[in-house]
């Protein structure tokens, strides 16, 4: 009897733990939405064109499966990752340089401020005119979108380094190179990772737009093809795949961030 009471108390304490309770609420929300989707589609309350059933989604996935490895290779490894790396590298380097150098700011800051309000997608006609239709144009579009995010992010990250850190380093006899290496870099790494996480999600959106420019394979191309033939189930399958990939990359970046900035204190999740 005492053992049963102990188990009941442990169960109550587990359920009423705030973190576990929040997880339970999240699970119920997702389960409720899935249940609502099944009921709506099975009862035909909404035409299949607007809300395909789970069975239709599964059939669409099986139909897309033979082309899926090639589409993933084309989108992820030939467009997204190269554009992502170029955009992060150039954007971060230029942002830090502008923040650290008055000459760099004088030269590049006005250009960045002119380019910043321009939507990357608005540059598609100009990119096609300059570079034609192909991988270079598609990668450049993704790179440009990521570049704008990272250059502003890294510039503001350096500007937001607490001056007391720099003053303390100078007092201890640090030179400019030591200040940059031992004070500036560690201070901006968390903000840089935040920018990388935003950029990772944005890269998939830019890829879909990039594949409008003459692509004959890839997730964005399949999305456009499904829209053209009103294959709503195919659209949803591709969106789910993009969401899973984006979440996976975000998870990897987040884990890398925690590992690199293990010294940084964080607010505990409640």
Image (cartoon, helix red, strand yellow):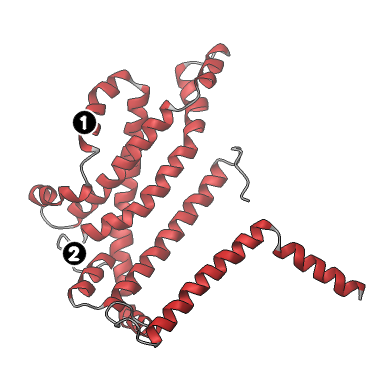
Q: Residues within 10 Å of mark 1 (few under 14, many from 20)?
A: few
The residue at 19%/52% (across/down) is 136
The residue at 39%/48% (across/down) is 198
- Choose between 77 and 19: the one closer to the eye: 19
Q: Which image quadrant is residue 209 in?
A: bottom left
Q: Residues within 10 Å of mark 2 (few under 14, many from 20)?
A: some
Say whether residue 58 is left or right of residue 111.
right
Outermost residue toward the front? 45
Residue corresponding to mark 2:
215
The residue at 35%/40% (across/down) is 150
Q: Position of residue 85 (x, y in %)?
A: 34, 47
Q: Position of residue 66 (x, y in %)?
A: 32, 79
Which numbered dot is residue 7? none
Q: Secondary structure at mark 2?
A: loop
Total count of labels? 2
5 above or below 52? above
Outermost residue toward the bottom? 43
Quarter occupied by the N terminus: bottom right
Q: Position of residue 201 (x, y in %)?
A: 37, 54
Q: Secondary structure at mark 1?
A: helix
193 above or below 169? below
- Choose between 12 and 217: the one closer to the eye: 12
Q: Position of residue 258 (x, y in %)?
A: 56, 46
**Which circle, 2 or 1, is nearer the viewer?**
1
Outermost residue toward the right? 2
Residue corresponding to mark 1:
111
Q: CA distance from mark 2 to mark 1?
A: 31 Å
Q: Earlier in the sequence, mark 2 or mark 1?
A: 1
44 above or below 131? below
The residue at 40%/87% (across/down) is 42
Q: Are marks 2 and 1 in contact (CB under 8 Å)?
A: no
């Amino acid at each position: 009897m005492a053992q049963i009471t102990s188990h009941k108390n442990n169960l109550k304490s587990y359920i009423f733990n705030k973190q576990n309770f929040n997880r339970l609420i999240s699970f119920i929300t997702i389960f409720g939405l899935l249940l609502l989707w099944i009921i709506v589609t099975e009862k035909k309350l909404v035409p299949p064109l607007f809300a395909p059933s789970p069975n239709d989604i599964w059939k669409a996935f099986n139909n897309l499966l033979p082309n899926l490895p090639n589409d993933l290779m084309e989108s992820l490894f030939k467009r997204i990752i190269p554009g992502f790396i170029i955009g992060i590298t150039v954007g971060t380097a230029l942002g830090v340089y502008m923040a650290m150098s008055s000459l760099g700011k004088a030269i590049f800051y006005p250009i960045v401020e002119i380019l910043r309000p321009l939507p990357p997608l608005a540059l598609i006609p100009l990119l096609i005119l300059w570079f034609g239709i192909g991988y270079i144009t598609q990668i450049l579009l993704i790179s440009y979108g990521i570049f704008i995010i990272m250059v502003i992010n890294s510039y503001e990250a350096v500007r937001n380094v607490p001056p007391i850190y720099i003053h303390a380093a100078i007092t201890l006899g640090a030179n400019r190179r030591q200040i940059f290496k031992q004070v500036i870099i560690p201070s901006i790494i968390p903000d840089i990772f935040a920018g990388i996480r935003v950029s990772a999600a944005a890269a998939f959106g830019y890829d879909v737009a990039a594949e409008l420019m003459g692509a004959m394979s890839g997730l964005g191309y399949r999305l456009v093809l499904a829209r053209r033939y009103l294959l709503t189930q195919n659209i949803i399958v591709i969106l789910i795949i993009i969401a899973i990939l984006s979440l996976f990359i975000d998870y990897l970046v987040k884990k890398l961030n925690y590992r690199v900035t293990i010294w940084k204190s964080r607010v505990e999740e409640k």
